[in-house]
Amino acid sequence: MRFFTESKWYLAVAFVIYIILKALFASNIASPYIQQIIQYAIIIALASLGLNIIYGFTGQFSLGHAAFYGIGAYTSAYLTKTLGIDNIFYYIPVLMACSVISGFIGLLIGIPILKLKDDFLAIATLGFGTLVRVFFDNSDKISDVLGGSRGFVGIPKITNLELVLFFTLIIIIITRYMINSRFGLFLRCIKDDELAASSIGINTTNMKLLAFTYGCMLAGFGGAFYANLYTFLHPSNFDILKSIDFLIIVIIGGMGNIMGTIFASVIWVGFIEGLRIVLPSEILDIRWVVIPILLIFIMMWRPYGIMVKKPK
Amino acid sequence: MKILEVIDLEKAFGGVRAVDRLSFFIEEGEIFGIIGPNGAGKTTLFNLISGIYSPDKGRVIFKGKDITGAMPYKLSHLGIARTFQNMRLFNGLTVLENVLSAVLSKRAYNIFHAVFRTKGYLIGEKEAYNTASELIESFGLTEKAGYPASSLSYGEQRRLELARALATKPTLMLIDEPGAGMNPREIGDLASIIKTIKKKFSVTIAIIEHQMNLIMNISDRIMVMDFGEEIMTGTPQEVKKDKRVIEAYLGEELD
């Protein structure tokens, strides 16, 4: 089947990565804490890839990506906990459902707000992000399970390396195929000049909605994995700062660069968590001095992302 | 046969009537020139026909079908293509991709074909690639196919925009000031390019242009506009002689 044969190299590399990680995990060279971080990095890559479709490829600036990540996380947490799901065969449909729900909410929000451009779109998505955060904060009033501002506790731990790697790989392949097809081309046209895109026959409204919905689906997918990896959710994990994390990853990975986003996610998570290990806890907050300075240098050194020396 | 008919079209911006009760028609197969001083409403007229603005009043009939206020992408699918006064190329895309996107916007393989790389996808892509390559070749841009559109010279960018518009397989093409910023030699080339387009792709052409040599040379009929209204419409010879036109627009140029 061409779906796999045309991505031989991706499959091969993913397999090698899997073998290495599995060896590290099984032999306990990677402590459970490190194992968690590695899976988390892949999850962040998956969600960031969604934002890259929305912002990097299509140019629709979103400050609300963490909201869709959060919707996926809370949905999965709620479903797995209330349904008592603990094996992966029941978990896979839950993952799909979380992704679809995030995508559907993205679609509903996208219909009115994607008419807006640039700064106005940023403010509208920021508004939605805040709304979702406030909703999580007060969610215990709807159902006590959700935990509100105390956080959502006791989520079954189901996420494992195999699941995360497998689905991320499949989604990278799907995304590549979509981007390399006429649909990806249309998204890039819209980013460059929306008016010209519509004048050559591209239904820009639908294409923007497609990109936004798909991007939100990936965020929801990632969020679901996250909930069943850490087993605890707190509304503050899904606020504006998280959205900015995703933006930073997309920008340092390179706008419209799929593999760049993956590398940037791993570097970003590795760096933040790595500093946590390296730095003594009393000066841990110095991270938030080092990281912005580093970002400034990255932007000066590689303004088009770490993978690209010069624009084409 | 009338390919396009505009009836009592009106569009105002604030208090300014950019297009004011304008009526005219374009015959199939002709080159229809539109001239008039700056601010006469020519580009607004193109924006109204191509769906970028919707008119306050009046109707636009294309091939007997009322298309007033339709979305630009729908008009593109019906067969109306346009170029822009200030060129709106996709600068982040290569020359080939600029044309390819226009070809593919008509080509229907759906997203499942794309994701699962079916035969339909491969055939669709291949055909589009061939069509786009041919178009690029006929505009002499083959050597630049892989370069970003922004790296082209001004004249090349104008040609690319024409190629991209033609890639949508139009029957009516609206060309907005193709000669702007060109030197006299390039304008000479432009006249032959436009005549070739008309013949080779059998399209009807409406063209806005300030270069009198160009427009008088290529047009079958010319409409003169001022303050959003039609002053007169006629053959280039009739236009040159008309007193009202000379007063409003041509002025000393004919002395």
Image (cartoon, rainbow, N blue to C red):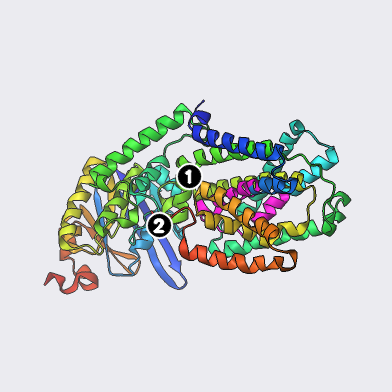
Which corner quadrant of the image does residue B18 belong to? bottom left
In percent of the image, x 42 and y 31: which residue is there?
B122
Could you tell whether A235 is left or right of A82 in the image? left
C-alpha separation, residue under disc 1 versus residue under disc 2 = 22 Å
Question: Do the residues marked 1 and 2 share a common chain?
Answer: yes
| Relative depth, front residue between B62 and A267 | A267
Q: Position of residue B201 (x, y in %)?
A: 26, 41
Q: For mark 2, what is the residue?
A: A310
Residue extent of the magenta highlight: A42-71
Q: Name the element at disc 1.
A: helix
Res A28 visible: yes
Q: Residue furthest right?
A: A144
Q: For mark 1, what is the residue?
A: A184
| Relative depth, front residue between A111 and A70 | A70
Chain bearing mark 1: A
In percent of the image, x 81 and y 42: which residue is there?
A156
Chain bearing mark 2: A
Q: Position of residue A77 (x, y in %)?
A: 79, 45
In percent of the image, x 67 and y 42: which residue is there?
A100
In percent of the image, x 86 and y 55: which residue is there?
A140
Q: Position of residue A87 (x, y in %)?
A: 78, 33
Amino acid at dot 2: Lys
- Assess disc 1: are there few (<14), some (14-19) or many (≥20) residues with their C-alpha within 10 Å of its C-alpha: many
Depicted B250 relative to depicted A80: above or below: below
Depicted B213 relative to depicted A4: above or below: below
Depicted B179 relative to depicted A21: above or below: below
| Relative depth, front residue between B14 and A163 | A163
